[in-house]
Amino acid sequence: MTWSNWAGTAKATPQRVHRPRSAAEIAEVVAGVSAAGHRVRALGSGHSFTAIAAADSDALDLTGWTGIERADLKTQQVTVRSGTTLRALNAALDALGLAMTNLGDIDAQTIAGAISTGTHGTGARFGGISTQIVALELVLADGSVVGCSADERPELFDAARVGLGALGVITTVTLQCEPSFALSAQERPEPLEQVLDGFDDSAANNDHFEFYWFPYGSKALVKRNNRLPLHAERKPLSRLRRFVDYDLTENVAFGGLCRLGRAVPKLVRPLGSFASQVSSPREYSDLSHRVFVTHRGVRFVESEYAVPRESVLDVLAELRGLVPRLKDPVAFPVEVRVAAADDIWLSTANGRDSAYIAIHQFLGMPYREYFAAFEALAGQVGGRPHWGKMHDLDASVLRTRYPHFDDFLRVRKECDPAGTFANTYLDRVLGPA
């Protein structure tokens, strides 16, 4: 088979694709690959923009290893198989009257892929998805199956919650969930200067706050999501309103503008200004995962950096000055989110409250100058790249950005001494196994 990720930025042709349907079969595959001196990667759903899942030798397709394995409604802890997508997991939790505390805006990823790359949502008091993990089970390079938690193999737990697939193949993830809850969503365009001036207050006074800035425009699309009491009445968008706002406006119409800009680059600037003006305000409420998640039908490439919270406005000011000087125009908005500090070794929020700046370009349009310049800006404040999004940093630089980088490498050596789980991407960001 030929494998490609969602954006088409990474491709691979594995020699063998294994499709295990149990933890025992995963262990058998890994032990066999290791004994043969080959390398193996789990494919996930391919939603990373990097080649983190690319496998040239052996690949693991975990689409046959899905679903909830057990749920404790008293503790609200749920153990889920690693090939389960977030979309399927949210539906299954909903049926149990449970929910995840925080989510990103895409639910196509597998749970293992999402945590392994450090996927996050937004909220100044909330961490990324990996902070919701209470236990993991992994298959190590020798085929052994091990568990880890804060009490069992705590160093492996510190490393594996954002493990890049470098330590072993995750078989199950145990999540600390909570009772289902609803979110009140307020989405509206606001003057960019007003959004920036009130950034700290908005982040502090809303459960989940983010905004999108359209280059060449004077407005930002601001999203404020706040928790409702358990039994509050929900007022979801009608099916027609959802179709018009999301399917037609944010996907069909916006995709059309992007294709026009790609064909006639000189139109990108006026189209970007137009796009920033036409977003319509909307207010609604619904179950949390229906508010967190948004359908993305327009394909793009993306780079995202986590910067110290106190540095975000300075980086954005430099980014705003950079965009008009680029040779090629930018057709996609910039997304800004926040997250609380955590203690996970390779989490982009390790040890510091963080803000995330994600830049995008429409698929097929030039992006390298833009991404490289943004990377330099973020680097001036110690920015850390999202592990599943495009960047050019290597182990020598990343070591300076993560206090526990060498601790992670030590645990990696213990779990995978021969580099069974390595690939070209990991060779760059972690160094040879």
Image (tube, rainbow, N blue to C red):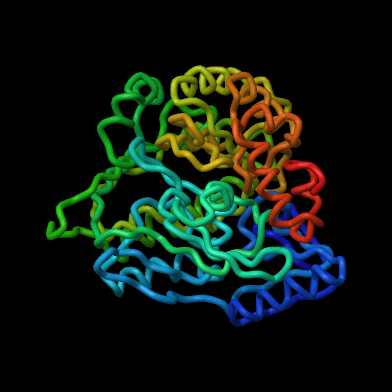
- Image: 25 above or below 431: below
Nearer to me, 106 or 244: 106
**Residue at figure coordinates x 58%, y 20% from the top left:** 381
Name the quadrant containing residue 235. bottom left
- Dividing the image into 4 quarters, which one contains the N terminus? bottom right
Residue 419 location (% of width, % of height): 79, 56
Is residue 117 among the parts visible in the rendering?
Answer: no
Could you tell whether 385 is left or right of 9 in the image?
left
Is residue 169 among the parts visible in the rendering?
Answer: yes
Residue 68 location (% of width, % of height): 43, 75
Nearer to me, 188 or 306: 306
Residue occupying the far front of the picture: 152
- Image: 51 above or below 261: below
Residue 267 location (% of width, % of height): 62, 35
Residue 37 location (% of width, % of height): 87, 66
**Residue at figure coordinates x 68%, y 79% from the top left:** 19
Number of on-image labels: 0
Nearer to me, 19 or 106: 19
**Residue at figure coordinates x 37%, y 51% from the top left:** 102
Could you tell whether 421 is left or right of 79 in the image?
right
**Residue at figure coordinates x 53%, y 63% from the top left:** 147
